[in-house]
Image: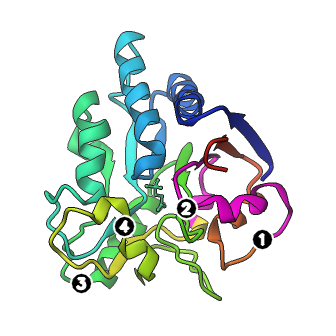
Amino acid sequence: MNKLVYAENYDGMSALAADMMVRIVRDNPRAVVVIATGGSPRLAYRIFCSRAKSEGIDVSGVTFVKLDEWLGLEPTDEATCEFFIRRELLDPLGISEDKFIHFDSLAPDAKAECARFRAEFDALPSVDLVTLGIGKNGHLGLNEPSDQLFTRAHTMELEAKTRTHEMLTHTGVNVTRGITMGLSEIFRGKEIMLLATGGEKAHLKDYLTDDRITTEAPFTLLKLHPGCTCFVDRTAF
Ligand code: PGA
């Protein structure tokens, strides 16, 4: 990765990630921030929310964009990225609906949903920060390992590993497909924050420090982005 910043543990990594979010939103109160979900960024978001309150940071003009979503779940299902983002960011920060761009987990026509998202995303004046985690299989958003990746928002058949993601543990629905931003949309971020943490990912460790890129581990493509900072939890990698 272009820029690797090591932290002793998950708490330390999350504090560094929250620092970056605070800096970007302070510098630009109208910032557009793409939001990954899952265990990797959860604590960073909680620290960010608590600092926004205690330091009086105005977040009312910030736009939040959902990176990806599981398909086939009610949006109110606790397993959805929708639920996660509302609980961890939008509700605690009091963000209004017009400042949230998102995929619909129950969209009846997935192609039309992708087209709708693309148009809304393209209309954004800038994308200031993209937050990302690494999948156990090396995926990025729900861009799954494959011999080909896609530039724009699209739907994906999920790998077996992804279908057992912790977020899906308590839903009764068998989730087999997802919808995700594509690589060029992710690359639109002026800055990217990649959080390297979580169990069962140590086999991906060498990719952080060597110079290989491969569509079989999509997060490696971030080595091509000059504004990507990777915060590494030493206990995981
Ligand atoms: P995690 O998920 O942050 O819960 O480890 C990351 C991912 O699957 O992309």
Q: Are marks 3 and 1 in contact (CB under 8 Å)?
A: no
The residue at the point 76 percent across, 62 percent down is: 207
- Residues at discs 1 and 2 in contact (Cβ within 8 Å): no
Amino acid type, label 4: Phe
Sequence-wise first label, 3 or 4? 3
Query: SS at mark 3?
Result: loop
Q: Nearer the viewer, residue 39 or 223?
A: 39
Are there few (<14), some (14-19), or many (20+) residues within 10 Å of tag 4? many
Image location of residue 224, percent across then percent down: 77, 61
Disc 2 designates what residue?
200
- Above or below, 32 against 116 in this view is above
The residue at label 1 has a CB less than 8 Å from ligand 1: no
Q: Pick whichever of labels 1 and 2 is earlier in the sequence.
A: 2
Q: Nearer the viewer, mark 3 or mark 2?
A: 2
Estimate the spatial distance between the alpha carbons at disc 1 and disc 2, rounded to whole Å. 20 Å
Q: Amino acid at mark 1?
A: Ile
Is residue 216 a member of the stretch shown in magenta? no
Magenta part of the chain: 185-213
Q: CA distance from mark 3 to mark 2?
A: 34 Å
Residue located farthest toward the right when viewing the structure as drawn = 211
The residue that label 3 is drawn on is: 109
Q: Is residue 167 visible?
A: yes
Instruction: Give the labeled residue for mark 1.
Output: 213
Tell me if I can see residue 224 in this picture.
Answer: no
Q: Secondary structure at mark 4?
A: helix
Q: Which of these two is toward me, 148 or 29?
A: 148
- The residue shown at (43%, 73%) is 162
In whole angstroms, how far apart are the C-alphas of marks 1 and 4? 28 Å
Name the N-terminal-most of marks 2 and 4. Answer: 4
Where does label 4 land, which residue?
117
Please name the residue shown 18% across and 66% down the image: 171
